[in-house]
Amino acid sequence: MRAVENALGIIIPDNARIIRNLITGIQYVQDHVIHFYHLHALDWVDIVSALKADPAKTSTLAQSISDWPKSSTTYFKAIQGKLKSFVDSGQLGIFANAYWGHPAYKLPPEANLMAAAHYLEALDWQRDVIKIQALLGAKNPHAQTYLVGGMSIPIDQNSENALNAGSIAFISGLAKTAKEFVEKVYIPDLLAVASFYKDWAGYGAGVGNFLAYGVFENDNESNTSNLYFQRGIIKGKDLSKVFPVDHTKITEYVTHSWYEYSDGNDKSRHPWDGETNYKYSGPQPPYEYLDTEKKYSWLKAPRYENMPMEVGPLARMLVAFGSGHKRVQEVVKLVLNHLKVGPEVLFSTLGRVAARGVETLVTAEMLPVWLGQLTENIRKGDLKVHDGSKWEPSKWPKEAKGYGMHEAPRGALGHWVKIKDQKIENYQCVVPSTWNGSPRDASGQKGPYEAALIGTPVADQEKPVEILRTVHSFDPCMACAVHVLDATGRRVTKIRVV
């Protein structure tokens, strides 16, 4: 969408920009909270240990870090009873397939019970707050109301099927609910858990280079550089210098990917000239065992100036911090001071977890700001959400090309399009998990996942929770980048498609 707008020189209306910010903003907040509790917490939290907790002591702990109302002894005793019923039945349900009792778990029983309670609360909370996305985007996570030139959702005070005073008031209430949970549950829990795992500031550093396209537009230009979270690049963990982003310096290798380039696999291509040619036609994926000297990944290897780059919340917050974003700097310093650690811990597994929390809080604070901007535009009589003046193919140039840069919750998302004779001639995208999960390139440089795992201690190779901690800290996209492999060729799992 942004790529086509860029190719055709389309500038979207102000209301469309604001609605896009609101959709992306609530997606960030919901997605990051889900990641912390439902995708990553059980790498740090031992649910079974919570059965040993004293609910009264858990209540004291919870009340010492937050004034969240659900912190009574009775409440935590009820949660403990619910967990016990899971365990006693032998059917752990949502808590199955974890390494309970693993020596790498460090939280005391009371902290485990508190985290387990908030895990369950977050299930209900996220279901409610994402209604903002449903109202503005129709579907989560792939919003359906985006159009080239703006948005399809109308603003009409006299229509129940459009944005009106009632729906805006409802969204305002949900935004308040989102912010309150982040402030009083998520951030206190994050700090409490992190305080027991400070040693993880020494693991998972990765490649040390960070790329952020920036997000939350302050003006309506396609690929604007006027962004709330700034665009930039950090090299070699040096926060004193943030480099500008030049999309023409992005290329992709397929040297170790199950793809072929027509001019050779050791060369790289810019996405405008990208190819996605998969030639293997056998019944199984083309590997018997993991061999990093050959092709071993479904992902290409994106590089910026031939350097691997980490993308995601840590990259965004580091670029914002280094670019002088006042609020980000305030919250980062608050977190570091609370944990009594220095900024060097940001370049780690623990740093990724903390950065995601920082970003969630700062984004949640902006939701009512953007909603206020939209309300003010409507008050002034500005109801425009789409500009279709350039959507006339007969008037397009014979050839056009464009690019769109966006930050999905997981990181930098780029789309490149070539249009010829009013048709798409080539279209390529480079998604966040491709950057982070990329295999080695022609020079043998590791991608962020691989680099981050080096030096990780593993207490039990059959139960590698330590590996999960670092990989999960990137928040991999399962559809984009999860491979289940075993170094010895052993079948790990079999999925039957019917």
Image: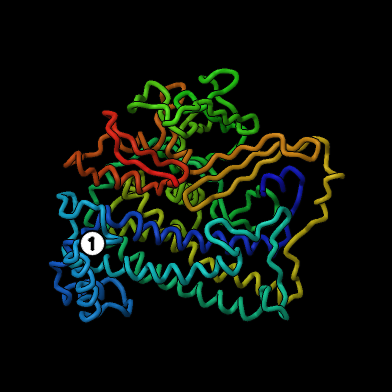
In front: 1, or 194? Answer: 1
Q: Residue 353 placed where, x, y %?
A: 35, 53
Q: Residue at x 80, y 51 (%)?
A: 391
In front: 186, or 115? Answer: 115
Q: Is residue 352 left or right of residue 96?
A: right
Q: Residue 195 placed where, x, y %?
A: 24, 58
Q: Is residue 232 left or right of residue 359?
A: right
Q: Is residue 146 left or right of residue 306?
A: right
The residue furthest front is: 498
Q: Can residue 88 be spotted in the picture?
A: yes
Q: Residue 188 placed where, x, y %?
A: 32, 66
Which residue is label 1 attached to?
Answer: 91
Q: Residue at x 65, y 33 (%)?
A: 272
Give the vertical position of 269 relative to 212 (above or below): above
Kind of element beneath mark 1: loop
Q: Residue 455 placed where, x, y %?
A: 25, 35
Q: Residue at x 70, y 62 (%)?
A: 152
Amino acid at dot 1: Gln
Q: Can residue 340 be spotted in the picture?
A: no
Q: How many marks?
A: 1
Q: Residue at x 66, y 41 (%)?
A: 403
Give the vertical position of 289 relative to 66 (above or below): above
Q: Residues within 10 Å of mark 1 (few under 14, many from 20)?
A: few
Q: How is the image coloured?
A: rainbow
